[in-house]
Image (cartoon, helix red, strand yellow):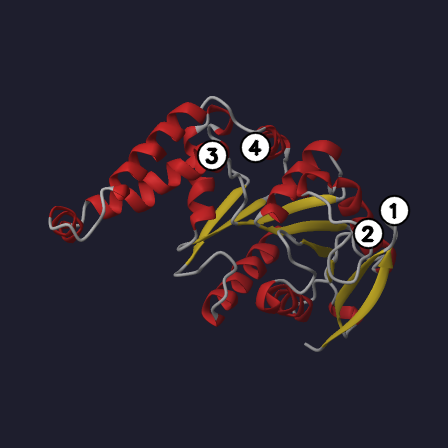
Amino acid sequence: MNVHEKAIGIPGPQADMLGIVSMPDSHAAWQHTAVVVVVGGAQYRAGSHRQFVQLARCLAGAGYPVLRFDFPGMGDSPGEPISFEDTATHIAAAITAMHDHCPDVSQVVLCGLCDGASASLLYTQSTNDQRVAGLVLLNPWVRSEASLARAQVKHYYLWRLAEPAFWRKLFGGQVGWQAVRDLGNSLRTMRAKEACTSSFQDVMAQGWRAFTGPILLLLSERDLVAKEFVEHALSDARWNGLLERPVVSQSTIDRADHTCSSSTASRQTESFVLQWLEGIR
């Protein structure tokens, strides 16, 4: 199906934000579910290596209107950059703009990568916006000193310690004892910080627990941020049982990095999202 796109202005708290709406050419093929992409990190609406452009056109080609937009200070939106923790009013404005420009849309799915996924959960917790029917969360950001240390210990240091070559190099003087000291530092950080979780992770857990719509959790196989998220969700009592909720669908993107930069990972991501959308109509 052919896709057409148009630029729109989204009224924001301080200034308008620029958005791009991708729509199927044939109005008869439109679905009543639309997707609003919540961009994360220091990115604008196109995403790393145009991943959100490709995703939007794929979904629009299947009948799902998609809006991707620039937060203040990013891309073509004026103003000062804002933290992902302060994006609720901007996400609300984007959802309103989607309904204004696509009046046949009856429900919206938020789709975010990294702290865009985190911002989506924070939004649902702070607003309980009934227009949001589902969440697509790709490699959610939960980083703290403890979560980073825990992921490093499990997915890097333990892997290295299990390698015979590491010990041969260590005792042969080819690897400095600094590597062992780094492991000790990570263990101490993990233990010292485990009881001190930043507030945004707690609010994310509250939003996850309170949200009654379907959630698609996508995790890149080769991404430390994804591994941090899983470690945090499995070790923090406030996340207990959240990944096992019946509304949650979880998939791993094979051999993918954080932004799914390979064409194979990008296509797999698009396939996962499209299949999930077809199942929640």
Per the image, label 2 sits on a secondary structure element best described as loop
Q: Are marks 3 and 4 in contact (CB under 8 Å)?
A: no
Query: Could you tell me which quadrant the N terminus lies in?
Result: bottom right
Q: Which residue is mark 3?
A: 145
Residue 7: x %, y % from top left = 82, 67
Q: Amino acid at mark 3?
A: Glu
| Mark 2–mark 4 distance (CA, rounded to whole Å) | 27 Å
Instruction: Give the vertical position of 5 relative to 66 (above or below).
Output: below
Q: Nearer the viewer, mark 3 or mark 4?
A: 3
Q: Amino acid at mark 1?
A: Gln
Judge the density around disc 3: few (<14), some (14-19), many (≥20) Cα neighbours within 10 Å.
Answer: some
Q: Amino acid at mark 4?
A: Gln
Question: Residue 14 shows which numbered tag?
Answer: 1
Q: Nearer the viewer, mark 1 or mark 2?
A: 2
Question: In the rendered view, does 213 fall on the left or right side of 258?
Answer: right
Q: Amino acid at mark 2?
A: Gly
Q: Which is more N-terminal, label 4 or label 2? A: 2
Q: Nearer the viewer, residue 152 or 9?
A: 152
Per the image, label 4 sits on a secondary structure element best described as helix
Instruction: Name the quadrant containing residue 193.
Output: top left
Question: Residue 201 shows which numbered tag?
Answer: 4
Q: Are marks 2 and 4 in contact (CB under 8 Å)?
A: no
| Mark 1–mark 4 distance (CA, rounded to whole Å) | 27 Å
| Mark 2–mark 3 distance (CA, rounded to whole Å) | 30 Å
Q: Are marks 1 and 2 in contact (CB under 8 Å)?
A: yes
Report the label total: 4
Question: Residue 79 shows which numbered tag?
Answer: 2
Q: Which is more N-terminal, label 2 or label 1? A: 1
Judge the density around disc 4: few (<14), some (14-19), many (≥20) Cα neighbours within 10 Å.
Answer: many
Residue at horizontal 51 percent and vertical 68 percent from the top = 267
Residue at horizontal 81 percent and vertical 70 percent from the top = 6
Q: Which is more N-terminal, label 4 or label 1? A: 1
